[in-house]
Amino acid sequence: MTAVEIIMFACLAIGVVFNTLGVIGLLRFPDVYTRMHATTKATTFGSIFTSLAVIVYGLSMFFSQADSQYLTLAIHAFLAAACLAFTNAVSAHAIARAAHRSGIRPVLAVVDRLAEANL
Amino acid sequence: MIEQIPHILVLLGLIASAILTYYFKDLLAATLAAGLFSFLISLEFYILQAPDVAISQAAIGAGLTTAIFIIAIGATGRFEGESS
Amino acid sequence: MIAFLVTAGMAFLLYLVLTAGSGSIGFWSFSELVMGVLLAILNGLIARNFLCRSKSYRLLDPRRLLQLLVYVPGPFFVELTKANLDVAYRVITMKIRPGIVRVHSGLKTDLGIFMLANSITLTPGTLSVGIDEATNDLFIHNINVSEGDEKRDVIESTELFGLANLPAWIRRIAE
Amino acid sequence: MSRIVRTAADIIYPFILIFGLYVVAHGHLTPGGGFQGGAVIATGGALVIVAYSYAEVREWLSKNVLMGQEVIGLVGFIGVALIAFAFGQVFFFNYLNASGSLFGIPVPYGINAGELNTGGFVPLMNFSVGCEVWGGLTLVILYMLSGLEKEGC
Amino acid sequence: MIDAWILTVICLTVLMVLATVRLVLGPTAPDRAIALDTVNTLVIAAMVIIGVIFKEIIFVDVAIVYGLLSFVSTLYIAKYIGGEL
Amino acid sequence: MKKMIVLFTSLLILSAFLGVMALTFTFGAPKMTDMDDYFLRFGQEQTGTNNQCTSVTFDFRGFDTLGESTVLFCAVIGVALIFRKMQAGEEYEDE
Amino acid sequence: MLWNLPFITVVVLTFIGIVTVLLKKNLIKILLGINILESAVNLFLVSLGYREGGVAPIFTLAPSELMVLPTPQALTLTSIVIGVATSALVLSFAMVLYKKYGTVDIDKIRRLQG
């Protein structure tokens, strides 16, 4: 086990753990908004880390073998992770807004300013 | 053997999502299940070494199929057996 | 004209990133560069009214770009990590006290609002639910409203972040 | 949709466009081609349509231009195939391959890194089919939205 | 060496199946939509890793297509749920 | 009810037929591969493409693609005609 | 290996698709069934062309020379795009029918007609 492999496996482990937490939160939380907290943050973070493992793999192979295809692998994995982080936030906002417009109120809420604002 | 486990799980997920598409009375939920079906079948094509087909299914199934079904549901009605 | 140049330039940069590692001029081959220029011109002709809809070219300032490049892996990533530890804690213990609060942002441009909303969505315990189009205030679903906050009408956006002052960064970048 | 979604659609549309063009242009080297790239770009158009309302989009995306794109794509596809007669060959013969001119560099046999300037008339066909699919699928979404009862959606 | 990658993919597919449970149960439509969104994210992560397992560099393009386009369907669903379509 | 029973029986017979047919194929070992092996061996030098799917789509089986793009064109024209009539306010009455 | 599981999946999916087309009354649900049927056929073609240990038929930096069959993939590829266009056509017909009859239930449409 070299240092690079340890970093890669650590990234994979972190990614799997946070993805698992996200899915458990999706199953356990009581209403839409809290479920969205779990899925948006945790699965985005986990997928960024699994992609990071691939990036580390590609870069280490690129520097050890000087083969430019591994550079392509690293860059494309980075682009996939970046698109993921960008679009997940937007779609979470869209679904939250739509859920609130369709009349679903947060369970256990102590305050709901958006319903008072009457937009 | 261990490499086949994701393949088997994806195939089972395909069957499950097809049954869900049949089962839901709410057409919006049925469309969502069809979207899940499309994602899983794209992953299956990817595993079967057909990246061309996977890209095609990704581009079509991720956006356009769901979009046209949602538009048609918006024009007609959300529940099965509903009429105006 | 500026819009066309900006869009074509960004498209060309993205094309270069996508095709890195194809040849010998730097990382690129000659035909890739020619094709990249052609496709970037086509892209600029089609999409110039989309990318530059607001007609503000603040991000062309290199200092702002540099700050953007520091912001994403720096303070933003730190807050993202903290958010995930927070979510892990809430998933395991189920201690939640949710509520939707109004947050005063003080930002004016579309890009600033967009960046703040996305940062809020990905950072601790908060999720942007709605936006007041007139005053640019955001409505935030907070998973753990702290004591006393439910009485207040408006919360300042800097109070949401613990470690780094993200709204100040966004104001420096986008305003 | 809200202002955040509109800004996001504005920012991401050029990237979808250039990525779709990349998929079309590299159809003979990497997974992709005319059908896939055209579908990607058409989905980008669907993104713009969903972020704004139909009344706004109708002025940016002209139906006549899209229909013209579709016709040009189909005619270009048949035309590129028909030029083979001018070389004294059969229909769909790849006359540009290994000719040294446009897209005409001969390919080494076996596994290689790939060079964009190869493929004969396949890239031209990719571009025309991509044009057709782009126009056609965007047109489908636009027309189906116009069939909705409610205005201002 | 390769086993860690395969193990990760197996975990991700199991998580997909678990997220499908929320798609079945979900009392309201937004619940089902976020379940679909979760499956999306997991599919992208799995695709990137399977690309490494197969040693095929060019396969990762499919994951980028997913990352760029998967939220279009989510936006359509959100627009319909929000009553704007 | 009788109709349903007939329908289900025929469907069961159909699926049993399909199942037997599927079990006679072996997954992972295709039998007739002459044409595809030819494409794999000579496609690269005859069409100049590295991606053999594209070479089959646009060169070897170009006529299929021609027909399919015509079908696409016709479908889009059909959608356009339907909604143009709808927008023009024509009523869909019986003759 | 894998005990022909992809083919069995194809059979099950075909069964579900045909049942959806035959038993459901709603036009949009029938179209979802047709989509499933179409995907089943695509999956059947692609898995017919799969070769044990083969790689995708793309020579750009492929890891080995043994490749899966390209022709089924090339035919499947176009059929997906055609499928979405024809689905759009039938959905537009459904929208027109709803405008005229006020329902997309095929039994009610038949009754209203005759």
Image: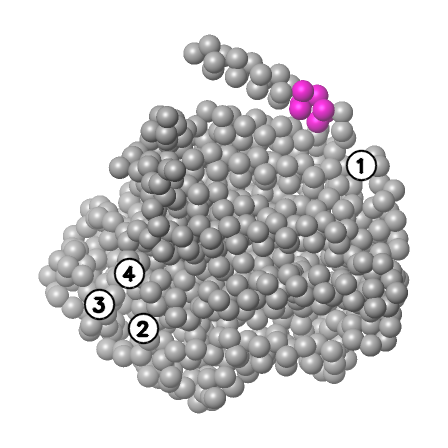
Give above or below for D121 relative to B76: below
Chain letter of mark 2 equals C
Q: Quadrant of residue D53?
A: bottom left
For badge 4, the amino acid type reads Gly
Q: Could you say whether the residue bearing mark 1 is in a helix, strand or loop?
A: loop
Picture residue at 69% right of the left edge, 80% below the top: C33
Q: Residues within 10 Å of mark 2 (few under 14, many from 20)?
A: many
Badge number at residue C132: 3
**Amino acid found under the numbered disc labelled 3:** Asp
Secondary structure that dominates the magenta span: helix
Residue hosting label 1: F30
Question: Mark 1 or 4, which is nearer the eye?
Answer: 4
Q: Residue at x 65, y 50 (%)?
A: F68
Structural crowding at the residue carrying mark 4, measured as other residues with C-alpha within 10 Å and reported as few (<14), some (14–19) or many (≥20)? few
Nearer to us in this view, E38 or G76: G76
Image mark for residue C113: 2
Q: Which residues are magenta?
A: F17-23
C-beta proximity under 8 Å, tags 3 and 2: no
Which residue has dot 4 on it?
D152
Q: Is residue G27 visible?
A: yes
As for residue C17 lying within the magenta part, the answer is: no
Image quarter (top left, top right, bottom left or bottom right) of the C terminus of chain B = top left
Between discs 3 and 2, the one toward the N terminus: 2
Q: Quadrant of residue B2?
A: top right
Left or right of A98: which side holds A118?
A: left
